[in-house]
Amino acid sequence: MKKVLFVTSEAVPFIKTGGLADVTGSLPRYFDAAKYEVSVILPKYLCIPEAERKKMRHLLHFYVDLGWRKQYVGILEAKADGITYYFVDNEFYFAGDRPYHNIHEDVEKFAFFSKAVLEALPIMNYQPDIIHCHDWQTGLVPVFLEHIYKKNPFYQAMVSVYTIHNLQFQGRWILQAMRDITGLPAELFTPQKLEAYGEGNYLKGGVVYADAVTTVSPSYAYEITTPAGGEGLHGLMQYSSYKLSGILNGLDYKVFDPVTDASIVRNYDLDSVVEGKAANKKALLEDLGLKWQDDTMLVGIVSRMTDQKGFALVDYIMDELLSSGKIQMVVLGTGEERYENMFRYFEWKYPDKLKAKIMYSEDEAHRIYASCDAFLMPSLFEPCGLSQLMSLRYGTVPIVRETGGLKDTVEPYNVYEQTGTGFTFTNFNAHEMRDAIYYAHDVFFNHKDEWYGIVRRGMQADFSWDTSARTYEKLYDSLL
């Protein structure tokens, strides 16, 4: 049996700020236990809920050199759903009310974390065959492994995999300061290695030095090799294409299951989806103070409110959508103040058409997925996306822009062949988005049989973690 160590800055059930935590907390449970033993290591943040921290037991402690610094490292352990989680403890770095603060603090924090992980392995008597690193926060792990630790026989057989969940976030900082923080030699901070546009770049280090690089959908793996999607690193991604692949994220079908979900008013399956969704929609509308209207399609949004998620398009077309009489909308999420205020304004202007909850609640999210007729996700770019997978699982028809993982997971409706699982548009254009929404409404209102064909095909699509795990296993097999 081969051992795999996931190195990540967050993982459910312990700490979550986004989809990264869902991946690193869910995927390890789906590997073939006869072939791979997967463990996870992450920081022991002070903001991890006390109930979760109480599950941890202290294993050992030691000190690590980081540049000119000598820092305490504690290692703790906890079990969750059969997976062993390790935690790196240092209150100087991991105190505070949230896991990330600002780039100045975070580049040192995650340099410490990356080196502490590698330094801990022989002391723990734990020798993974594969170290699987996630996002810029762990980009230095392959660098440290190659330039420091492989001189030691304990590390020489280890291979590294580096997964990019969002290329926009790269861990960039002042070159000289990064040299001081990491203690790495000046010759590593060149354009061929860790330097990009005059700055040090953690993500670039991970891409250059990892044995394999993945991202979270096949389309995004292509898009990051282009000037439009490469976030300034498209040349590096083109050069690294020999070791770059896209493996689609999955969804935990045990957590997101309309048959057993305790958060929704009525459970349903493929056979009872019409009645089940109607009951959930009626209950949600009553709670929101909106009226049921047979000719009005309820559109849901559950999202971080950022430019990436396409809210500039929503802002541009909201007056037309809500005044049309065809659309009601329920929104859940937080993010940039201008978008939060945009939804507050339109809720005030159209109180019978829009309800915006500027907050996040997992239970409320599940209710929206189960209750809405359609789900809007017009992203500027989307490495994979999980919300469209959740909406498909609950029979809520996605309306998405054809980019990244959205393109890979939502098949456009074809009226002639009666195929497809959603409605799509190609360009980042508000009127194209509007037309896709109105087309969906026409099918919803005038062609109910075709609409529920789309619903059922979406519910039958398989985007569970099982498929993703088998693909990762093939990658691991090829490296070993």
Image (cartoon, grey):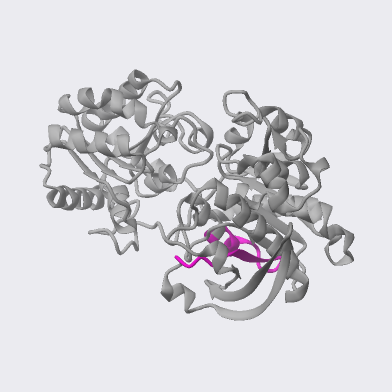
Task: State left or right for residue 28 relative to residue 49.
Answer: right
Q: Nearer the viewer, residue 35 or 330?
A: 330
Residue visible at 86% across and 60% down in the picture: 156
**Residue 36 in the image: x percent, y percent?**
70, 65
Placement of 250 over or under 56, stated as above or below: above
Residue visible at 73% across and 75% down in the picture: 124
**Residue 159 in the image: x percent, y percent?**
79, 55
Placement of 166 over or under 17, stated as above or below: above
Task: State left or right for residue 383 relative to residue 376.
Answer: right
Magenta stretch contains residue 41: yes
Residue that lies at the very extreme toward the front in this rendered image: 68
Q: Nearer the viewer, residue 42 or 397?
A: 42
The residue range painted magenta reads 25-47
Quadrant of the frame with the N terminus: bottom right
Please count the marks in the image: 0
Placement of 78 over or under 28, stated as above or below: below
**Residue 436 in the image: x percent, y percent?**
34, 25
Q: Nearer the viewer, residue 478 or 454?
A: 478
Q: Nearer the viewer, residue 290 or 138?
A: 138
Residue 157, image quadrant: bottom right
Residue 418 appears in the rendering: yes
Residue 350 appears in the rendering: no
Quadrant of the frame with the C terminus: bottom right
Residue visible at 63% across and 28% down in the picture: 232
Residue visible at 68% across and 46% down in the picture: 178
Magenta stretch contains residue 163: no
**Residue 342 in the image: x percent, y percent?**
25, 33
Residue 473, image quadrant: bottom right
